[in-house]
Image: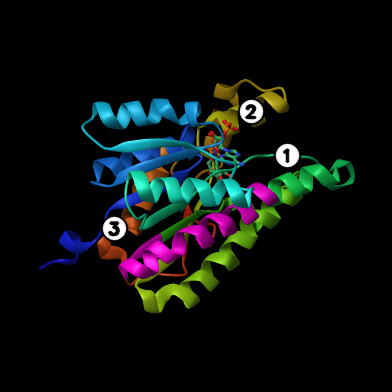
Amino acid sequence: MTEQTTTPRVAIVTGGARGIGAATALRLAADGYAVAVLDLAESAGQETVDRITAAGGRALAVGADVSDAAQVQAAVERIAAELGAPVVLVNNAGVLRDNLLFKMSESDWDTVMDVHLKGAFLMTRAVQKYMVDAGFGRVVNMSSSSAQGNRGQVNYSAAKAGLQGFTKTLAIELGKFGVTANAVAPGFIATDMTAATAARIGMGFEEFMQAAATQIPVNRVGLPEDIANTVSFLAGEGAGFVSGQVIYVAGGPLD
Ligand code: NAP
């Protein structure tokens, strides 16, 4: 009997309503997972769920703030009850609160740490027992090329670098239970997040993307599907010997 037939196949994608998270949820559904599309508002995830269902997949929209321990616990218990025990977790929910250090407020620092770092911690802590019980699990954390430093993002780059250390420690602690943990570090991906950055600095999104593409070796910006493809590999059974790694998906070298 192959591992595939015995492994429960339920995935959770946080921030799954839009952008990279939505593309990842759709891709994991196409790969055969039942997918919980977790986002701040349950209604926000419904469109992704409808697209999965229309394509013949199984999905559930769940509302929760990943930085709130009680909401996370309730959401994960609901997913386990309604879809089944989750064995894939993609910690993708994210926000930006960009500013230069001297103008950055304490709340901009805290918000970014809470959503990216504490959110990944709370979600992974809540989900790990299902993975350990199954003897199989895949955690994929969404880092960023900004982990290597980016002007105006002292909060975000610290959180995204922190996720890399978090990932490596998960790999060390959970490996013996059949659970791998990896980080994907996207470069410039065309989503609402990068569109908001263009708006903030007063540039049109097309112009902003063209300028970004000139700095990227493959000469284009990334698409959410570029990240979804990489998550799909890491979530798969075949990636069981890949753990604790950071994969830059940025159209060219960063590391
Ligand atoms: P996006 O389009 O802004 O989507 C982010 C999603 O996360 C939204 O649906 C948002 O919900 C949700 N979210 C925010 N805070 C949340 C919370 N506390 N609890 C639950 N959900 C929450 O962003 P994206 O560009 O797809 O980025 C996805 C991930 O990739 C993020 O971690 C981001 O940092 C990372 N990343 C993106 C890029 C890029 O170029 N786009 C590059 C590197 C890394 P609301 O709509 O309600 O706010």
| Helix, strand or loop status at disc 1 | loop
Depth check, front residue: 87 or 243 = 87
Where 2 sits versus 49, above or below?
A: below
Quadrant of the rendered structure where residue 200 is?
A: top right
- 3 vs 2, front mark: 3
Instruction: Kindly report the distance in space between the C-alpha atoms of the residues bearing marks 1 and 3.
Output: 33 Å
Q: Is mark 2 within 8 Å of ligand 1?
A: yes
The boundaries of the magenta stretch are 114-138
**Which mark is on residue 158?**
none
Q: Earlier in the sequence, mark 3 or mark 2?
A: 2
Where 11 sits versus 238, above or below?
A: above
Q: Quadrant of ligand 1?
A: top right
Residue beneath label 1, please? 97
Quadrant that contains the N terminus: bottom left
Instruction: Kindly report the distance in space between the C-alpha atoms of the residues bearing marks 3 and 2.
Output: 32 Å
Identity, as a three-letter code, of the amino acid under mark 1: Arg
Dot 1 and dot 2 residues touching (CB under 8 Å): no
Identity, as a three-letter code, of the amino acid under mark 3: Gly
Q: Residue at x 74, y 50 (%)?
A: 155
Residue 98 rendering spot, x and y as whole percentages: 74, 40
For residue 250, say whether it is visible: no
Judge the density around disc 3: few (<14), some (14-19), many (≥20) Cα neighbours within 10 Å.
Answer: some
| Helix, strand or loop status at disc 3 | loop
- Magenta residues: mostly which secondary structure? helix
